[in-house]
Structures are given as structure tokens and as C-alpha cells.
Amino acid sequence: MLSKKKSFAIKIFSAIIILLVGISFLQRSIDLQRKFEDLEANLLLMPGEIAGSLILSGFRGIGADLLWLQVHHCWHSGQHYRMLPLFNSITFLQPHFITPWAVGGWHMAYNIYVLMKTEKEKNYWLQTGLNFLERGVKHNPNRYDLYFELAWTYYHKAKDYANAVKYFEKAVKFPHPEYVDSCLAHAYAKNGQIKKAIKQWEHLRDNTSFKKVAVRILHNLKTYGTENPPEKKEQKK
């Protein structure tokens, strides 16, 4: 009888231990989740450079992932004003993660830009996007990606062809897709650097899949001094 009681007591004691261990793990999980929630709230309220100091060790990647999800929420809910501090925080936590730099610059210079009503506001967001991409380049100087993103924004959005040439030239110094070479050729032509444009298109004609385009543009550059032939004026009857 005593043996049965002792066996029953051991089983009860074991069950209590297992229950306590389970509760302990659950509590740790809850505490960790609360830390992440507090972290996200604090990062959203503070500039990225200051917010990053809240994360001292292994939480950087997880914190950045949480904030990345918050970026999508802000964009789709129309809270564009919250996106800049979010991008600043993410890129501070993971400065070598290319995507937030590229997407952040694009959102500012294109998507938020087009939503603004005044030229002053538009110019502010365009310049903010360019500045953001320039910071990204400084953190990732040995890859073509952000040089290209910055060059393209100068070329396509800002119409600043001198700076477009500057950053396209830096982009092609690193392994890159061949379309980057064609962008540099277009930028040379837009910037009035016709001899360099011809040389670049000759390289594209001889070494890439852009041969047909290159032949046509080379003809125009050598004949008219521009990539496209001048528009024909209607003759008077």
C-alpha cells in the first residue's frame, strides 16, 4: 500500500515539475514577444540612428524584420509619414541589406513624391530619396546595386545627367547586368558626352545582346549627334 502511495506521489511530483517547466518556457516566450513589441514601438518613435542603440546584440535581424513588415503596413494604410524613420531604423540595424535601401529610395523619390501636391514637397521627397540612396552607397561601396539605383533616380527622375553618369560609371566597375552598361551609354548621350556615348555603344554592339539597338543608336549618334533622329517637319503644301 505504501509502495502504491509513493509511486502515486512520484507521478504527481513529476507532473508538477513538467508543468512548471512548460510554464517557464511559455513565460519566456511571452516576455520575448513583449520585448519585441516594445522594441518596435520605440523604434517607430525615434530616429533610426538613435533607435538602433536599443538593440545591442542578436535582436538586430529580428528587429529589422519586424520593422520591414511595418513598412508594408504603413504604405498600404497610407501612413507615408512613418516610413522614413522606419527605413532609417532598418538600414541602421542591417546596413548591408541592399533591399531596404533600394526600396526606401524608390518609395521616397517616386511613390511619396507623386502623392505630394506642391513642387516644394515633391522636391523635398525626391532629394530625401537621393540622400537616402547616397547613404546606402557609403555602407555598400563594393557592389553595383545602389550605385545603379542612385544613378537611375538621377537619370530618370531628377533629370540630372551629370550625376547619373557619375554613379553609372561607378556601378560598372563591379560585377553587374549588361543593362547597366546601356544605361551608362544613354546617360552619356543625355549629358552631351557624345564621343563617350559612341564608345560605350560600340562596346555594347560588340560584347552584349544589345547589338541591334546599339547599331541603330550608333547610326543616329554619328549622323545627328543624338540617340534619336530629329522629328521630320511636315512640308507645306
Image: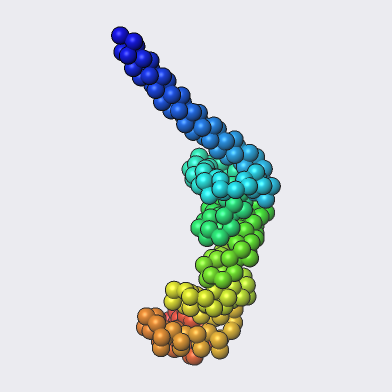
Residue at the limit of the structure toward the bottom, as seen here: 222
In the rendered structure, the answer to whether residue 7 lies left or right of residue 168 reads left
Furthest-front residue in this view: 2
Residue 56 is left or right of residue 236, and the answer is right
Residue ID at (49%, 33%):
29
Residue 53 visible? The answer is yes
User: Percent position (x, y) of residue 210?
Assistant: 39, 80
Query: Which residue shows up at 58% across the image and 75% down it?
Result: 170
- Of residues 188 and 131, the one drawn nearer to the viewer in this rendering: 131
Residue in front for this viewpoint, 127 or 30: 30
**Which color scheme did the rendering employ for the protein?**
rainbow
Q: Position of residue 1 (x, y in %)?
A: 30, 9
Residue 19 makes an appearance in the image: no
Quadrant assignment, res 141: bottom right
Residue 37 horizontal side relative to residue 211, left or right: right
In front of the other: 32 or 212: 32
Q: Quadrant of the C terminus?
A: bottom left
Give percent across and percent down for residue 107: 54, 54
Residue that appears at 46% across and 87% down: 203
Q: Residue at x 56, y 80 (%)?
A: 188
Percent across and percent down for residue 111 are 53, 53
Q: How many marks?
A: 0
